[in-house]
Amino acid sequence: MAKPSAALGRARALWFRCDLRLDDNPALQAAASGATALLPVYVFDPRKFNRPTLAGARKSSARRARFLLESVACLRRELEARGSGLAVLLGQPEDVLPPACAGADGVWVQEGFCSEEQMEEAKVAKRLQGGRLNPVWGGTLYMPEECGCPPNNIPLLFTAFKNKAEGRGRIRHPVAAPKKLPPLPAGD
């Protein structure tokens, strides 16, 4: 596993979670835009493998865990091909991300929309010292402000939402993966 620099200086960090793509990744675009250095990070959280769901099933099977390992390895290769890399950490994000990203201007992440992801973001944001967590919406066909109705007034019935989205919504074009990324932060 990669060991990140203790101090990142004027760099940014990007926390990968579920969206392990470089193309059509608004969080990656936001973190890389104007950055002099970028530290991409993935955290293997043991809670996501061992904790049972409300129904009592395990959160991750052996097949799913293997797929995730292969996906993270592929992400690392894609980042390295663009002049970057990937720090892979093991632990709870709220414990391992803040020290790994110490001194960064901020940590960018794809905004979670599930309660579990939002709680995780809140814990990380609370523990970041000097930096801030910058959630970026992504991973959906419609952006919240472009779905044909105000995000705070979405119809409760699917058909009403579908009619507004199809009639007034705007689907954005996918964003291509960057050809080059900012370099990793210089080590101590």
Image (spheres, helix red, strand yellow):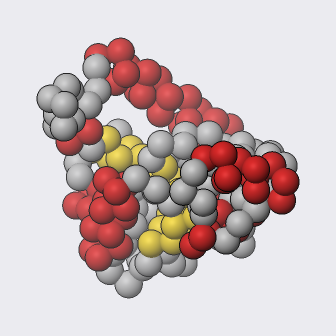
Q: Looking at the rendering, in which quadrant would you find the C terminus?
A: bottom left
Q: In this orientation, which residue lies closer to the viewer: 12 or 24? A: 24
Left or right: 52 in relation to 29: left
- In percent of width and height, residue 22 lies at 66, 43
Asked if one can make out residue 74 in the rendered structure from this viewpoint, the answer is yes
Compared across the picture, whether 65 is left or right of 32 comes to: left
Q: Is residue 175 visible?
A: no
Q: Position of residue 119 (x, y in %)?
A: 30, 62
Q: Residue furthest bottom?
A: 130
What residue do we see at 68% from left, 37% from top? 81
Q: Is residue 50 above or below residue 154?
A: above
Where is residue 127, by image quadrant?
Answer: bottom left
Tally the numbered discs. 0
Between 58 and 168, the one lying in front of the other is 168
Camera-side residue of 47 and 113:
113
* 129 horizontally vs 164: left or right: left
Write the residue at 84% across / 54% down: 167
If the image is split into quadrants, where does the N terminus sit? top left
Residue 10 placement (x, y as % from top left): 54, 78
* Residue at x-position 54% and y-position 57%: 156
Residue placed furthest toward the top? 63
Residue positioned 62% across, 40% down in the render: 21
Query: Residue 126, position in %: x, y?
Result: 29, 76
Query: Quick check: 7 above or below 116?
Result: below
